[in-house]
Amino acid sequence: MKISKKNVLNTAELARLEFDEETLSKFVRQLGDILVHIEDLAELDTENIEPTSHVLDLSTPFRKDEVIQSITREEALRNASSQENGFFTVPKIIINLGPTDDPISVHPIIQSELTVLPPKAKKQD
Amino acid sequence: MSIPRTIKQTATLIKKREVSPTELTDLFLERISVQDEKINSYITVWKKAAVEAALMAEKEISRGNYLGPLHGVPIALKDIFVTKNSRTTCGSKMLENFVAPYDSTVAEKLIASGSIILGKNNMDEFAMGSSNETSYFGPVKNPWDTDRVPGGSSGGSAAATAANLCIASVGTDTGGSIRQPGSLCGIVGMKPTYGRVSRFGMIAFASSLDQAGPLTKTVEDTAIILSSIAGHDPLDSTSVNLPTVDYASALSSDIKGLRVGIPKEYFVSGMDPEVEKSVREAIVELETLGAEIVEISLPHSRYAVSTYYIIAPSEASSNLARYDGVRYTYRCEEPESLRDLFFRSRSEGFGDEVKRRIMLGTYALSTGYYDAYYLKAQKVRTLIIRDFDRAWEEVDVIASATSPETAFRIGEKAEDPLKMYLSDILTIPCNIAGLPGISVPCGFSSEKLPIGLQIIGKPFDEQTVLNIAYAYEQSTKWYEKEVASLG
């Protein structure tokens, strides 16, 4: 099955990727070719076949619940391109207290609260 | 002293005190600095750390504390194994400046064995590629012909080993990434059974398929490295708690009576006739050495590539979600919002092949497509495994070509991902079933390009795989043919 441009755009949204027009049309074509190739699996009757997610018989190994030396906070932060007071920093998540146009920049829980709250901050202004 | 090429030769020289680890390390660092610009097989060279490690090895050895055949031997690591001594890039802009706070188990074990790590080998970005053209740090070139690819994704490890810019290297294999470059560069490369070697600190691509293994000039050297890196690791819950043996001491070229299966499906259409000829001659050689040749069938092999290109990208899309621009990766300049930070860091930090696979995997796992793609592929995975299970009732190992062709030209397949994916057609089934597999040189084409023979074994039966490869290698001695000096 070929993939539509709309499908590629939806998938890019899920994968947190964006493309320029040229790459987008290249990807529509290349992903389409690959998806057509893998359609050969449909010829196989797998109705009563168990799926294999892993080749080994895995069980969850347990260990004693003991405090062990792990990496330090400094080590954990060493590769961060932006940090402050022992935390990773990111752009401000809440831009203003009113409803926002950008759903992904606000955590869904925060966002749902924002939409039910009257824009108090603005009134006080 | 002629420059040693194998672990065995190097260890003998060191033991006899004919060369010291520091002399050797200096020699190899010098070779890298002069020759590597021709093949680009290293991303980072450990100039200082290697010399320090060599000094330490020298002291230990002169004190009589000889640790074994890797002690003082200069080797390299694919830049997918994290090391606290240097950055680990995984061939990506995303991790260009990443320094891990810990060592991977493979690195730790190799350091503990006394080997000298010269540096980190170039590779396809996040191990996604069959030609080493997807590296952010530029393509690796095949030392037999620098207009051609070395294979991938462990192309830097294979090229550096073949050109003797290290005695040996350790790479990783998700769909053929050790065996295929081993074949294209005329050296030995082995993927052990899934679970044999710890994946702790090995940057994840497809977690149910990834496995680490050696790239060396001889089968015996592969056995030596495998003995050093194999074994249970509490830090990897998929590493198997089975006893490991000293594969090198147990090596035997007596293969009389062993049954070698030849799957008729593995002589695929479009196979290079010179490759087919060499592999058929190798099979005759195995028969001469006393093995019994049995024709077998692995009917679902032809679905392996499709299965792989659903399962591997699906696992990759999930594994690579962690590269978000926040904690330890590339971060875009002046992000306007968190959304902008995620989207731009990922889009600027990943190359096209990685994006293609993330897209493919995300699509295969997304609502409405999961059953048709991912679940279907997992069911076909079961069918492919059953093919092998049936084969093991009749044979001890399976033999085929490693790659249906010799090294192709740089750029030849770069714009056609599907064509590139099909170059792993003979190596992928082994990963899908988690089996051990080796590639051992079995001749050269008329253009003087190396050809590889693949031997696949039963789960955790690395020894039989090594023995067959060893018997073949010792009677044909293809490894004696060296790459001409790169200048």
Image: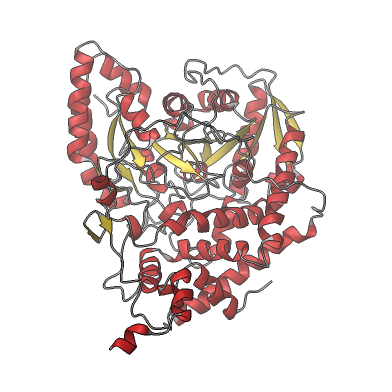
Figure label count:
0
Relative to residue B139, is residue B201 depicted above or below?
A: above
Q: Nearer the viewer, residue B112 or B462?
A: B112
Which quadrant of the figure contains the N terminus of chain B?
Answer: top left
Residue B20 visible in image: no
- Image location of residue B220, percent across then percent down: 46, 24
Q: In this view, does B330 lie to the left or right of B481?
A: left
Please name the colour scheme applied to the rendered image.
secondary structure
Instruction: Give residue A71's position: percent from left, percent from top.
Output: 30, 40
- B478 shown above or below B359: above
Residue drawn at x 60%, y 26% is: B461
- Whether A3 is drawn above or below B33: the answer is below
Q: Inspect this view and state whether residue B153 appears.
A: yes
Front residue (pair B343, B304): B343
Q: Which residue is drawn at 60% across and 16% down?
A: B254
Question: Which residue is the extreme one toward the top?
Answer: B64
What x and y, as percent, mark residue B2? 27, 27
Q: Residue at x 76, y 61 (%)?
A: A42
**Residue A29 on image: x %, y %:** 57, 75
Going by the image, does B389 lie left or right of B120? right
Q: Quadrant of the C terminus of chain B?
A: top left
Among the 4 quarters of the image, the one containing residue A3: bottom right
User: Which of the 4 image quadrants contains residue B429?
Assistant: top right
